[in-house]
Amino acid sequence: MRFDVITLFEPMFAAVTENGITSRAMQRGLWSLYTWNPREETEDNHRTVDDRPFGGGPGMVMMADPLARTVRRIRRSGNVGRVVSFAPNGTRLTDETVRRWVAEDRDMVLICGRYEGIDQRFLDNYVDETVSIGDFVLSGGELAAMVLIDAVVRQLPGAIKELSTLDESFSTGLLDAPHYTRPEVWEGQAVPEVLLSGHHANIAKWTREQALELTLRTRADLIEKAKASGKLSETDRLWLKKHGYPV
Ligand code: ADE
């Protein structure tokens, strides 16, 4: 999968190209990344990419033309994929969207805004969707773009062991259960006994109940969603009922 990123801060993307799973996946040829600075598509001496907002208000707005020119250049270089921009007013990024994009296997053009935002005419004419990674405001789209890249790339076939992504948070409809490793006792706390029993059915039951308990306690909205999408078994329903949650 190919990503082309439009950003004023190209070096930031070393975070995903030079570290960890995403870096290894890149070395294996599973994905590629090209960064483009919209200043390269300006013609004035100051290489201006932003200006004051019409109608007044604080801050600066990214101008449409340098961004549009950069997208056209990216198109000519061969990326015909989905164009995504980042802003707090976008559609929330979810595991479901990430998995759909991995399955579709289309290239992506990622637009990282800075300042107060991007001229709406560019968004209307060049961008397929605007994505938010949460209800908070970042200084720019770069970290959000890297969140998207990381979430997508780690799911590409061959990036990590397939099983690792099957039972992690969200894929099962619930939050992931807690994990433990050696030593068996640490700071006076023992690992839950069932995990040392070697009894696979009991371990699976315990793990599912831990996931149900944690999700119910911290993200009850996900229980509703799991119910609606048929991800709760009869055993899950009985456990929830027993713990005072009507399903
Ligand atoms: N840019 C600024 N804040 C953002 C957010 N929460 N999500 C995505 N892009 C952003």
Image (cartoon, rainbow, N blue to C red):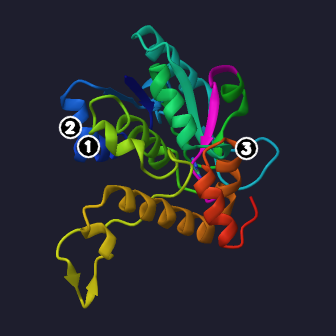
**Is there CB contact under 8 Å for labels 1 and 2?**
yes
Q: Which mark is residue 53?
A: 3
Q: Which mark is residue 21?
A: 1
Residue occupying image coordinates x 27% and y 39%: 161
State the separation of the CA atoms marked 2 and 3: 42 Å
Q: Residues within 10 Å of mark 3 (few under 14, many from 20)?
A: some
Tell me the magenta residue range.
125-136
- Residue 132 is a magenta residue: yes
State the separation of the CA atoms marked 1 and 3: 40 Å
Q: Residues within 10 Å of mark 1 (few under 14, many from 20)?
A: some
- Residue 60 is a magenta residue: no
Q: Say above or below: 205 vs 160.
A: below
Residue occupying image coordinates x 72% and y 45%: 228
Please name the amino acid that badge 2 sits on: Arg
Q: Which mark is residue 24?
A: 2
Give the percent coordinates (x, y) of residue 131.
60, 40
Q: Is residue 52 left or right of residue 30?
A: right
The quarter of the picture where residue 8 lies is: top left
